[in-house]
Amino acid sequence: MSRSIRWVASVRGFIKRISEERVLRLRRPPTIRTGPPGGEPTVYYLCPNYPVPSGGIRAIYRHVDILNQAGRSAAVLHHRDGYACGWFEHSTRIVGAPSVRLSPADVLVVPEIYGPYLDRLPRIPRLVAFNQNAYLTFEHVPTARPLRYDIFAAALTVSGDSAEFLRFAFPGLNVSVVGNAIDADVFHPSPELPVKRIAMMPRKRPEDSQQILRLLGERLRNWDVVRIQDASEQQTAAILRSVPIFLALGRREGFGLPAAEAMASGCYVVGFSGFGGREIFDPAFSTPVEDGDVLSVARELARLIELYEHRPSEIREAGALARERIRERYSLERQRAELLAFYDQLLADQLIA
């Protein structure tokens, strides 16, 4: 190996280590103090200080809102005092880890991203795993070290796919599904016919998306490709209302929230389900494609482009059907009922124990 090749390999290795260290810093939990009961038992959702839009963090905030609205004490537990997400509107109860002490009467809900550091969590509050993407469960966890999910009294997840993953990985773990909710007041179609635009999330499979767009070539000459990145919830919804087609590029997703939000906005969705999103892709109003098959995605997009240019009503009718299916299956009311049922059972089991 020449000196120049060794130097390039060394630089790449250094960059990879720096990237991994940054990811691990975000996943390292804060010091969580414990003590005797001193107030109303509370459900705390541990949450990273992540400043950019994230469907998983949005779900954490929504769970806390639902519990508080139902008269159950709950709070988002961020790593530091004074931190709160600013990319969507909320009035969620938030506390910082330095300012609270958790007691045996409390519940600490732990997202799957903290997997490498589960040994740092206290054992005094009752622990619940909130695993929104089971495919991240073992990420950054050394293979020589077992992942101790036996510390959790129960696990919450957001799809049947992730539930199957967790039940297989951790036999005996009590796993419940509380589906995501799509806010119909935020994500809804426009009454006007959208212009010729295709929306996508550029951080999802960038190499595949580049191949798909290059395969389409001149077929895109009268179309704009809108890349949704670092957009607020309201901005994302506005973009989705303005496009007839959404390109889904999920890879090993826990659910596939972008595709569901696009469907709720009246888009025709084509692309990869990411496994967890299989439950929302229905050939009656979308086109699921075998994972990684970029040619089939390009061919389907070409068909939809031509169809929209000549008979746009057919695309809009499929989008309307998708919107109704999402409203029916992923409503705020359904999520609320499932979440409260989970905690009612958890607290009942605690009293029996």
Image: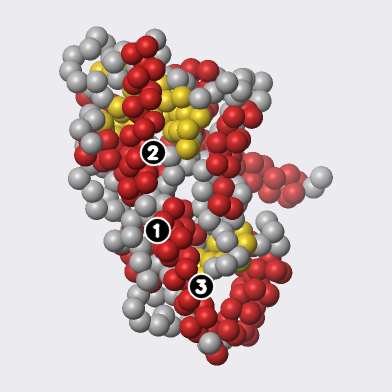
Q: Secondary structure at mark 3?
A: helix
Kindly identify the residue that appears in the image at 39 percent across and 58 percent down. 327
Percent coordinates x, y for residue 319 in the rendering:
47, 71
Above/below status of 249 relative to 168: below
The residue lying furthest to the bottom in this view is 310
Q: Mark 3 belongs to which amino acid?
A: Ala
The residue lying furthest to the left in this view is 39
Percent coordinates x, y for residue 35 in the rendering:
26, 11
Tell me which numbered mark, 3 or 1, is placed earlier along the sequence: 3
Number of other residues with Cα within 10 Å of mark 1, as a class: few under 14, some 14 to 19, many 20 or more = many
Tell me which numbered mark, 2 or 3, is placed earlier along the sequence: 3
Kindly identify the residue that appears in the image at 33 percent across and 49 percent down. 332
Determine which residue is flagged by label 3: 318
> Does the image show residue 212?
yes
Left or right, residue 235 beside residue 211? left
Above/below status of 109 relative to 58: above
Pick the front one: 97 or 25:
97
Determine which residue is flagged by label 1: 327
Percent coordinates x, y for residue 63 in the rendering:
33, 39
Q: Quadrant of the N terminus?
A: top right
Q: Mark 2 belongs to which amino acid?
A: Glu
* Residue 250: quarter of image: bottom right
Determine which residue is flagged by label 2: 338
* Residue 122: quarter of image: top left
Left or right, residue 280 beside residue 218? left
Kindly identify the residue that appears in the image at 48 percent across and 65 percent down. 322
Q: Secondary structure at mark 1?
A: helix
Q: Mark 1 belongs to which amino acid?
A: Arg
> Does the image show residue 95?
no
Distance Cα–Cα, label 3 vs label 1: 14 Å
Q: Secondary structure at mark 2?
A: helix
Tell me which numbered mark, 2 or 1, is placed earlier along the sequence: 1
